[in-house]
Image (spheres, rainbow, N blue to C red):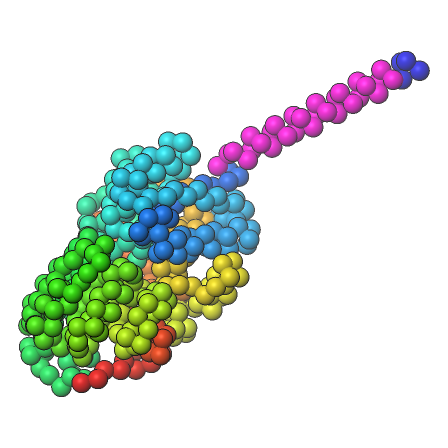
Amino acid sequence: MKKLISLVIVALIALLSACGGANQTSGADKGKSSETLKIGAIFPLSGNLALLGEESYRGVELAIDQANKNGGVAGGKKVELIKGDAPDPEAAQSEANRLITQQGVKTIVGSYSSGIANAASEVTERNGVLFWEYGAVADSITDRGYKYVLRTNPPASYLSKMHIDFIKNYVAGKLGKNLGDIKVAIAHEDSSYGTTIADEAEKLAKKEGIQIVTTQPYSATSNDLSSIVLNIKKAKPDVLIVVSYLNDAILLHRQSKELGLQVPVVIGSGGGHDMSDFIKGVGDIGNGIFDVAFPQYLINQDFTPGMKEFIEMYKEKYGELPRSGHSLVHFMGTKVLLDLIDKVGEIDPEKLREAANKYKVEPGKTVTGWGVKFDPKTGQNLLSQPYVHQWVDGKLYAVWPENVAVKEPQIKK
């Protein structure tokens, strides 16, 4: 009997040892990149930029959720998203260092904000880590000659070009004026976002012979823009280009109404102008305002395949409709990255950059309608494009160019 009990105890010890060993092996395997692929994400999730920062992050999260649900990438590997909160450039550098040194990530995505993107990408470049930008627009992000930077979204110069093209090819005719007689005013917040778009718009307008009658920079944190409004009113423009974040956009348009500023054509530049919170904040004042921006949701879905599915996924996960197109473009950019990882089979910055240089998608084949073709010298996607939208009855519709439009632009002379 004693012998039998001893045998049972030995067997139990052997079984427990085997289980412990199996668990240890499984835990070790989980940490290996062959099982889980880590992607870092840097966004302003707190502070003044948090609203659009969070909206942008949601797009990344949805793309990775979708990939994992569909079996992963690169032969069934799951993707783990490790986020970092960067409300300002200093925090962006700190978070980039943390993700690289402590988490061991080899690629980082972001970031919505140009200041954050510039700061984070300095760190990734020094460390040979690939940085993917999906939403920040400053041209400097891809103009510095960095090897490890790729951007899927259009830069500020593309937005400025769309402003001028729209004025030249549509607005002037509808106002019944020659291009040289059109008077344009620009109001912009004074960070790299607003300054870059405004400066480029001025250059392009000058080339076309369009008059810029006044340019009014201001701080996005200002609580009084009446002097800006009065200066614009004095200049009597036919067109007002506005580059703003959310709160300053609402303030500017409210004070324009209060001070009697009337401009036939007002064109926003993404940022606050394409958020549902903007129209809530300005009410009927917003109807008729144009917005040159990333693709929004009331758009020709024949040119943006997958749009309906994206909206459904968003609503299911977050319990509301998307708040702006920022989540959409970050979803699209992450889909490109995941596709490249799937082709390469791992997260290797050198291999991914090489694969990206050969990657090609025609316009009208992605959820944003953008094509994909990276410039080998800069990492900029040459086939991305902003569109012109307009607020009509509290909704933001794509109106120009024709391949994305679901409504005609409405201009009152």
The answer to whether residue 42 is left or right of residue 221 is right
Counting from the top left corner in percent of width and height, residue 84 is at: 38, 42
Which residue corresponds to the image point at 37% horizontal and 67% vertical from the top-left?
A: 276
Instruction: Kindly give the residue lying farthest to the top in the view shown.
Output: 2
Q: Residue 172, image x and y in percent?
A: 15, 80
Predominant secondary structure in magenta? helix
Regarding residue 60, the answer to whether it shows in the image is yes
List x then y, in percent, for residue 142: 23, 50
Q: Quadrant of residue 300?
A: bottom left
- Whether residue 163 is visible, yes or no, is no
Is residue 86 highlighted in magenta? no
Query: What residue is rendered at 49% in x and 58% in y?
Result: 318
Give the quarter of the figure containing the N terminus.
Answer: top right
Q: Residue furthest right?
A: 1
Q: Is residue 405 above or below residue 305?
A: below
Specify the quadrant that holds the C terminus. Answer: bottom left
Which residue is at the front of the view, 29 or 123? 123
Locate residue 265 relative to residue 53 in the image: left or right: left
From this view, report whether residue 275 is shown above or below residue 119.
below
Towards the viewer: 352 or 26: 26
Which residue is at a point 6% across and 79% down the rendered structure image?
181
Q: Nearer the viewer, residue 110 or 191?
A: 191
Which contiguous range is marked in magenta?
5-33
Q: Quadrant of residue 8?
A: top right
In the image, residue 202 sits, relative to residue 147, either above or below, namely below
Q: Is residue 22 magenta?
A: yes
Tell me if residue 337 comes above or below residue 161 in the rendering: above
Q: How many marks?
A: 0
In percent of width and height, residue 311 lies at 46, 65
